[in-house]
Image (tube, rainbow, N blue to C red):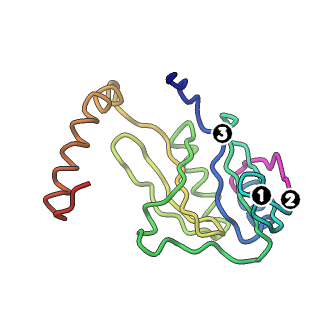
Amino acid sequence: MPVPSAVNGLYHFAFPCRDAEQTRAFYEDLLGLPLVHCMTADAVPSSGSKGPYAHVFFRMGDNSYIAFFDLGNNEAPLPSPNTPDWVQHFAMEVGSIDQVLAHKARLEAAGVEVRGIVDHDFIKSIYFFDPNGLRLEITTRTEAPGFIEEAEREAHAALAEWTRRKHQLTGVTV
């Protein structure tokens, strides 16, 4: 069996939204991500599911996209019942701490509640929710030289230690 080629990067990640226009206003007008595509259909090509929807795409600086499905029912997506709200989030990178602070000021001026700046030692981030309840992060890299290379060298050992610890805590093996 041939080995697949490496994944080049993110094309898009799609989320549900209650209202495509409200979502557009948030992502385009507030965050500055241009709406670059809106497609509508009455059936899903990949599954055959029936029902109207709009699929909207917002371009990020690296030409990848954050996308949304408006299913036309005006229902907000429900949070996962077994996952804390801080776990599932979409992180977007900017070039400097000044840009993070500029986003923070703009969001707060628009009435969006923002948490942070949170210092994670290798990045500094702000966190907030979009109108659909999706937790977003705007971050910038602040890692010391060599941090990424050291983290990569230690990643498998750290995961093995976590797996061992989790087994001790839960008694569950996978």
Residue beneath disc 1: 44
Residue at the spot 82% in from the left edge and 61% down from the top edge: 43
Residue beneath disc 3: 11
Dot 1 amino acid type: Val
Question: Label 1: how many residues lie within 10 Å, few (<14), some (14-19) or many (20+)?
Answer: few
Give the number of the mark in front: 1 or 2: 1
Image location (x, y in percent) of residue 54: 81, 61
Q: CA distance from mark 1 to mark 2?
A: 7 Å
Say whether residue 78 is magenta. no
Residue at the spot 76% in from the left edge and 68% down from the top edge: 71
The number of callouts visible is: 3
Tell me the element at label 1.
loop
**Label 1–label 3 contact, CB within 8 A:** no
Q: Relative to the observer, which residue lies in front, 16 or 48? A: 48
**Label 1–label 2 contact, CB within 8 A:** yes
Task: Specify whether 138 is left or right of 82.
Answer: right
Residue at the spot 46% in from the left edge and 68% down from the top edge: 85
Image location (x, y in percent) of residue 6: 53, 26
Dot 3 amino acid type: Tyr
Image location (x, y in percent) of residue 135: 54, 62
Tell me the element at label 3.
loop
State which region is magenta: 30-39
Residue beneath disc 2: 41
Question: Which circle marks residue 23 in the picture?
Answer: none
Q: Relative to the observer, which residue lies in front, 159 or 132? A: 159
If you read the primary sequence from the N terminus, does the residue marked by circle 1 or circle 3 appear first? 3
Residue at the spot 46% in from the left edge and 75% down from the top edge: 81
